[in-house]
């Protein structure tokens, strides 16, 4: 079963949703047969690489809220993150353009390290307060995931993996993605938002059951055990009231 996840490094709910999906998968009986692919989606493709705005200033400008309201909103999100074991420092968040981070993700997917890099990108941004728009930071993340620092830095200096990022974003528009996180299960069902683990588990079970239906065989009853007054044909039926 394949799970495709469209998300952005700048999205606080994407990291929370990632943990909730993982919690749902822990309860899924067939989690060893799941493939997760992380897709690219930029919440703000025009965001500058460097800005003097912090998270609170950005929220104030974007949603027309006061600084106090922005701080309160941030605290609420930090509480949600803590509930799934994540440590957020939104007051120290470094806002940036995430295009190169997405190119790194595509590169990592090619190298079989997409899941590791995705986790490290989110941790670097929300927990460690690193500048994930800087090539050196991104190369260090790649190295931590087991990739070459120098080769990653060389890749980032080019326009490699631009087409892959754009293809993911184009596909997101085609299937109607308007926000992230957005999950597509086996190209059959979609979930939007950082849903509860139980919601992920429900759709995983539903998708699995539809793809692997039980088939009742019509077996010859000859040779089956039976005893008068007990069960017949090797089966005990539910008593009807």
Image (spheres, helix red, strand yellow):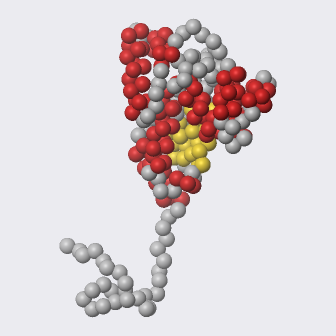
On the rendered structure, is 133 left or right of 77? right
* Direction left: furthest residue: 241
Front residue of this view, candidates 209 and 140: 140
| Rendered view: 240 above or below 24 | below
The reply to whether residue 203 is visible in this rendering is: no
| Rendered view: 34 above or below 149 | below
The image shows residue 50 at horizontal and vertical percentages of: 63, 12
Q: At 41% across and 14% down in the image, what residue appears?
A: 71
| Location of the C terminus (image quadrant) | bottom left
| Rendered view: 56 above or below 42 | above
Q: At 68% across and 27% down in the image, what residue appears?
A: 140
The image shows residue 170 at horizontal and vertical percentages of: 66, 32
The image shows residue 53 at horizontal and vertical percentages of: 54, 9
Q: How many marks?
A: 0
Residue 48 falls in image quadrant: top right
The reply to whether residue 74 is visible in this rendering is: yes
Q: At 51% across and 56% down in the image, what residue appears?
A: 30
Residue 236 falls in image quadrant: bottom left
Q: At 44% across and 51% down in the image, what residue appears?
A: 27
């Amino acid at each position: 079963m394949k799970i495709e996840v469209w998300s952005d490094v700048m999205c606080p709910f994407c990291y929370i949703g990632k943990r909730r999906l993982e919690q749902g998968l822990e309860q899924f009986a067939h989690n060893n047969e799941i493939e997760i692919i992380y897709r690219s989606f930029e919440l703000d493709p025009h965001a500058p690489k460097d800005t003097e705005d912090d998270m609170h200033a950005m929220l104030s400008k974007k949603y027309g809220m006061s600084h106090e309201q922005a701080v309160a909103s941030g605290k609420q999100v930090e509480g949600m993150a803590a509930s799934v074991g994540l440590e957020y420092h939104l007051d120290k968040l470094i806002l940036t353009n995430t295009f190169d981070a997405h190119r790194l993700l595509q590169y990592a997917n090619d190298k079989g390290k997409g899941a590791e890099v995705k986790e490290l990108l989110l941790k670097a941004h929300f927990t460690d307060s690193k500048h994930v728009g800087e090539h050196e930071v991104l190369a260090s993340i790649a190295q931590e995931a087991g990739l070459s620092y120098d080769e990653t830095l060389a890749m980032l200096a080019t326009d490699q993996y631009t087409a892959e990022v754009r293809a993911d974003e184009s596909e997101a528009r085609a299937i109607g993605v308007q926000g992230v996180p957005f999950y597509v299960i086996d190209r059959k069902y979609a979930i939007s938002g950082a849903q509860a683990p139980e919601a992920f588990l429900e759709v995983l079970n539903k998708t699995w059951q539809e793809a692997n239906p039980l088939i009742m065989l019509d077996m010859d009853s000859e040779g089956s055990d039976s005893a008068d007054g007990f069960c017949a044909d090797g089966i005990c039926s539910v008593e009807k009231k």
